[in-house]
Amino acid sequence: MSHQPGPGDESPAPPLKGLVGTSVAMQEVSATTRRVAASNASVLLLGETGTGKELVARAIHELSARGSGPFVRVNCGALSESLLESELFGHVRGAFTGAVANRAGRFEAAHTGTIFLDEINSTTPKLQVKLLRVLQEREFERVGDTETVRVDTRVIAASNRDLLDEVARERFREDLYYRLNVVPIVLPPLRSRRGDIPLLVTHFLGHYNRENDRGVVRVASAAAEALARYHWPGNVRELQNVVERCVVMAPGDEITLDLLPPTIRGDRAQAPSLPGRGGDLDSLARDLVEQGMATAAPDDDTLFDRVVSRVERELIAQMLGACGGVQLKAAARLGINRNTLRKKLLEHGLDEGGDG
Ligand SMILES: Nc1ncnc2c1ncn2[C@@H]1O[C@H](COP(=O)(O)OP(=O)(O)OP(=O)(O)O)[C@@H](O)[C@H]1O
Ligand SMILES: [Mg+2]
């Protein structure tokens, strides 16, 4: 559904550099990114792993008036509290064992530019207080120092956990959350914008063909179908790795089904109804809903019942499998009574005559 802007047409903004995707969700991400880049507001990037949070953080910086200044990324999840504090704010000589000289921190390094605080959800309460002050007053002290440092730095933060949930669990300060969340940008998971998959495949094929001096230019239809069907827990990063592997391994100019990893090749090739297969019920439920929506005709009023029924069937089948086929046990763990379970087993064709 590509849209060709014509004269006098309110043409959509061009996509961001390096950000591939024409889905409505990605168009919204591009538009918000452009709008927020023009300001100095703090931005909070939310989304699962591999959805492009760092890509967007860099785009905001480059499109902003600070683009010629430094872009400094700090992974807050990779360092202990005291190392992170010294990394962010710097320290003075003698502040702790090993502090043999004065050292500026990353906030000072990002002066006139942007600091990208990745995995902000990993910060401890003590650091959250210090971060709140930087956001409010633009000032802090180096570790072990009394002198106040002032910086002109834009803050972009990212989290791959639901930060509001972390606030509710009292693991993240509410006041810091609201300070960071001036403009939130949510990067959608790849499985909720499957239409972007072919574009991304083409994009990464071009990239890895150039990098490896290869000419893999075609995707066999069975392989394309498997790529379109897979649930992509690692999102775009996972897709990127798969395409790279295929470019390197392909004997000819085509990505064929056998080149794909088994998990992708076999992912829900049949209806998802294998009892006792286990796996993540949340993502399975999401997939069932998406499959249902994808196949629903506009005048289809059976969608709700069909999807709920498939989720119910899968849940019962898995629980029965987990309970070794013992219906009494499965009913108890599902929180329903045994007669209800029996009825549902019949309804779903799962009844095998036994009564466990
Ligand atoms: N829309 C996109 N178009 C092209 N490449 C993308 C897109 N989204 C992500 N990528 C690529 O996927 C990889 C992962 O993206 P990125 O590092 O921005 O993800 P992330 O959200 O920061 O993940 P994590 O939470 O694991 O740090 C990068 O190589 C990035 O270039
Ligand atoms: Mg990242």
Image (cartoon, rainbow, N blue to C red):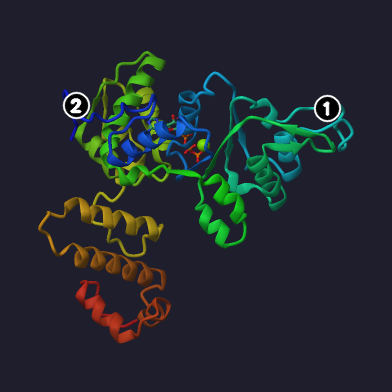
Inter-mark Cα distance, 2 to 1? 56 Å
Task: Indicate the quadrant containing the N terminus: top left, top right, bottom left or bottom right.
Answer: top left
Which residue is under mark 1?
A: 102
SS assignment at label 1: loop
Residue ID at (62%, 31%): 153
Seen in the image, is 11 located left or right of residue 209? left
Along the line of sight, the residue nearer the viewer: 71 or 98:
71
SS assignment at label 2: loop
Badge 2: residue crowd in 10 Å (few <14, some 14–19, many ≥20): few
| Residue 78 picture location, percent across and down | 64, 40
Residue ID at (20%, 50%): 294
Q: Quadrant of residue 261?
A: top left
From the image, state whether disc 2 or disc 1 is nearer to you: 2
Q: Does the Cβ of the disc 2 residue fall within 8 Å of ligand 1?
A: no
Which residue is under mark 2?
A: 5
Seen in the image, is 218 located left or right of residue 63? left
| Residue 25 picture location, percent across and down | 32, 42
Seen in the image, is 310 located left or right of residue 46? left
Badge 1: residue crowd in 10 Å (few <14, some 14–19, many ≥20): some
Residue ID at (27%, 61%): 273
Q: Quadrant of residue 148?
A: top right
| Residue 151 picture location, percent across and down | 68, 30
Identify the mark nearer the N-term, 2 or 1. Answer: 2
